[in-house]
Amino acid sequence: MIQYAIATEEMNRIMSRLHRLFDIRITFFDLQEHELEYFDMKPMSPFCAALRRSRTRNEQCAACDRRHLVEAKRTRDVHIYHCHAGLIEGIVPLYDRRNMYLGAIVFGQLRDRSRQPAADWSRSLKRKYSALRLYTVEKARDIGLLLKCVSESMIDHELIRYRNKTWAETLENYIEQHLHEKLTIARLADQIGRSASFVAHHFAVEFGLPPQQYLRKRRMEEARVMLENGTTVQDTADRLGYYDAFHFSRTFKRFWGEPPSAFHR
């Protein structure tokens, strides 16, 4: 459940500038250690995407992310490390003025010039590895320190902050319980006893996206979880209120960049 508000439009502008400046992948992980997919971020490298097609290696990637996010939260400082595949990664934990954890900026997928590809990798995987940009741990740390300065400014300007409004919590809970239904702004407004114009104006401030974009994002996130847990494409579409599997599949591919079948176990 979202416990804070993100100024998505402004965050996207900042992320885009950082991508152009460093030409590396920079993402944001939320309080539940999930990568927020809706930011305008540099795509995952072909090497990492190929690794994650293997269920075992995908689980290794996720476990590595979790382990080092915990370490970054513990130290409360820029954390540079090598992932299980030997790539350089970095984490910048975010804390507000009350020392409350807000999430983390994560960057990396960088090839360490001092390391060689694993002997058991396929020829194709080794080619993708060799195509990655060469970095040193020292250079990655410099980037991390700069990102820390940027993140502190984002927090000072409340681009990321804890949500403290009861109406937003009420709407969030209502949306989670009715994802399979058609939810209009008027219907959401009725749930909190406010006008439709109030919801239209304030929703994006609290949730980071306008109502319909947020609803689509939550449905797509829930759909991915269902597919990864073995639910069929048709059943997933039905449970989330889509009128047919084709419409659902087209929406899913636009959001995730791959069809539902790529995530079905």
Image: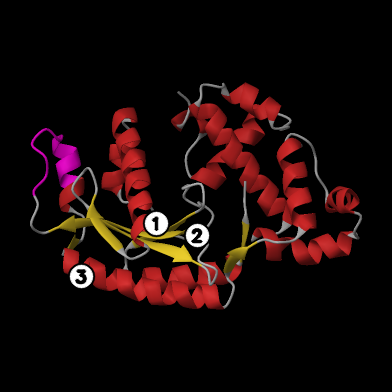
Q: Amino acid at mark 2?
A: Tyr
Disc 2 vs disc 1: Cβ atoms closer than 8 Å?
yes
Residue drawn at x 34%, y 75% as measured from the top left: 146
Magenta region, residue range: 116-127
* Mark 2 Cα-neighbour bin, 10 Å: few <14, some 14–19, many ≥20: some
Residue that badge 3 annotates: 139
- Whether residue 94 is situated above or below residue 177 in the rendered picture: below
Q: Disc 1 residue type? A: Lys
The colour mode here is secondary structure
Q: Is residue 209 visible?
A: no
The location of residue 242, given as percent across then percent down, is: 71, 33
Tell me which numbered mark, 1 or 3, is placed earlier along the sequence. 1
Q: Would you call the spot at circle 1 few (<14 residues within 10 Å), some (14-19), or many (20 or more)? A: some
Counting from the top left corner in percent of width and height, residue 210 is at 71, 59
Under mark 3, the amino acid is Lys
Q: Which residue is mark 2?
A: 101
* Residue 15 relative to residue 6: left or right: left
Residue nearest the observer in this picture, 82 or 122: 82
C-alpha separation, residue under disc 1 versus residue under disc 3: 22 Å
Left or right relative to 183: residue 84: left
Question: Is tag 2's residue or tag 1's residue first in the polypeptide sequence?
Answer: 1
Mark 3 element type:
helix
Q: Is 207 left, or right, of 39 in this rendering?
A: right
Q: Nearer the viewer, mark 2 or mark 3?
A: 2
**Which residue is at 11% across, 44% downward?**
117
Residue lying at 69% horizontally and 26% vertically, measured from the top left? 238
Q: Give the residue at mark 1.
A: 73
123 within the magenta span: yes
Label 2 – label 3 distance at C-alpha:
26 Å
Residue found at x 20% / y 70%:
139
